[in-house]
Amino acid sequence: PPARAPPPTPGASAPAPRAKRALPRRRAGDRRGSLLDAIDCTVTSAGSRLLAQRLAAPLTEPAQIGRRLDAVNVFVADSAAREDIRAILRGAPDMTRAMARLSVGRGGPRDLAALRDGILAADQALGRLSALDQPPQEIAAAMAALARPARALAEELSRALDEQLPLIKRDGGFVRSGYDSTLDETRNLRDASRLVVASMQARYADQTGVKALKIRHNNVLGYFVEVTAQHGDKLMSAPLNATFIHRQTLAGQVRFTTSELGEIEAKIANAGERALNLELEIFDRLCGQALAIGDDLRAAAHGFAMLDVATALAKLAVDDNYIRPEVDGSLGFAIEGGRHPVVEQALKREGQPFIANSCDLSPTPGHKSGQLWLLTGPNMAGKSTFLRQNALIALLAQIGSFVPATRARIGIVDRLFSRVGAADDLARGRSTFMVEMVETAAILNQAGERALVILDEIGRGTATFDGLSIAWAAIEHLHESNRCRTLFATHYHELTALAAKLPRLFNATVRVKEWHGDVVFLHEVLPGSADRSYGIQVAKLAGLPPAVISRAKSVLAKLEAADRGQNARALVDDLPLFAVPSRAAAEPAMSKEAEELIAAVKALHPDEMTPREAMDALYALKAKLPKG
């Protein structure tokens, strides 16, 4: 994941890179195919969020990383505990989200139920974790967090909340019968009144002889008697009009009310409103109890997330054969049998193996700084994959995860810089090459000795010799000034000659094999350098017309006759290593006239001069300027 910054202002210090560039999503914006998607085996939303946060902010303290690795190691070794905890976590609700909604007054009965279930799940998890023999510090911290919420709240919520809960508290009906006697009495009155309405409807139907008579309700009229239009005149005639009072006539119905119905409606409305108000009072009281121990509940939610991440990374390690890395405060960087976590999973789904490769950027004997690997080889051979996999392994190690390798020893990386791929930013007036240079400038201005830098194809977006010159100078700067651990992939084979002059520069290449005019990619990284890029073979694989391929081969044969490699080796001998002239040497010598002019200006005393004297001095200085 890249950590890029805008170009520095001339004369000013370069700005710090934006740390949250290391987001767990692809450049296209979706999560599928990203590192987070490849390693996320969490079973809760809180665990997934915590894993994403750790990816965006890896640790730089070996002791803290070691504590996280210890927690993962426990669940790697104890598969039964891992699966039991994951089963408990699957049933645990998202307490963090529930607390957030309750805190801002937007919570509902289901949020209270989530807190209840979360506390009960915490008790289950504690019971299972207590069987561990001397749990490491990270797991012990999670256990302490899970033990904080009072079980009394869960018991109170279990007594208060019904089995079926509405989404919104205003709907009512979420308090269990028997929890509050006053509420039960009010509900009985409300329900009994409704039975009275049903019996009243039957009595009115017998009284009027209208079997289709109904007592209905709406928010405008309240309760009313409704008959069809053909029976409306009957109810409006004596003697029934003494009982039934006309309210409304519609196309097919006539509506009436009675004094008895009005009295019953008042009782029903008061009972229903009173029951709802009592439930809302109970909800507010329970919500207040939960918010009073909000810190404990949030701590428990974080404890769940910590356990989820630890067990998820342990499952990943077991399923995909990851190993525990050694992380220390050195400048070491030695990875044996490293694999790209995302690409490996994609190949596994297709039934294909991933070719593992090793990388050692550790300081060599006699040198205090890490190595700079110059990687050459054809397109499609795996150079970019190799660069990224080593960066991702370092990132995984520093979030406290096992890594895809057979052995890994990583000295703390304080900054991870990446210059990979091609993209423009035309809306801000930046071409593809300008974006490449902006990102390269950020790396060269900011990378320190503890940084890890991966660069892919620097200088390819401009003219050949311009690009070669930029890449040449960048390698020298990384070697002599930044002195950081670096992987530098390039198609400029001339750069491999620098290994003769730069002691920490190591040439590596990706192995390929030609077979009947085609190229076979073996994806193995070996010491050495490539003498060609096989670009025409790759173009053929891409489907370029045969006429284009034939013409390209003809042109290439003529260009290779110039033997630019020999010229590059001669150039290394001609250019002194890192020959950056000083500013004094770079500027031309000052002329005698300029020296006299400076001396005349220094002799002036403006505060002591009259306006006339100042004008005379100005004309005198002008006269000293060189003619023309």
Image: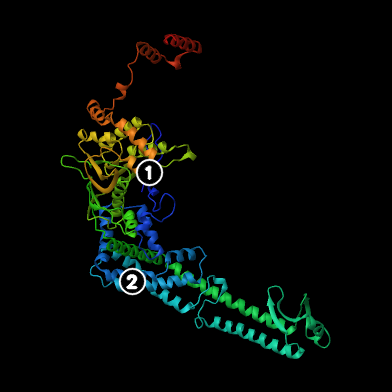
Where's residue 194, x and y in %? 64, 84
Number of marks present in the image shown: 2
Quarter of the image holding residue 343? Answer: bottom left
x and y, in percent, of residue 547 in the image: 39, 38
Bin the neighbour count of mark 1 within 10 Å (Cα to Cα): few under 14, some 14-19, many 20 and up: few
Between 274 and 252, which is closer to the camera in this rendering?
252
Type of amino acid at the residue the image marks with label 1: Gly
Residue 391 spot, x, y in % from top left: 30, 49
- Against 191, is 539 above or below? above
Within-10-Å neighbours for mark 2: few <14, some 14–19, many 20+: many
Residue farthest toward the left in the current orientation of the protein: 365
Residue 147 in view: no
> Disc 2 marks which amino acid?
Ala
Q: Residue 293 got which mark?
A: none
Q: Which residue is mark 2?
A: 125
The front one of 585 and 467 is 467
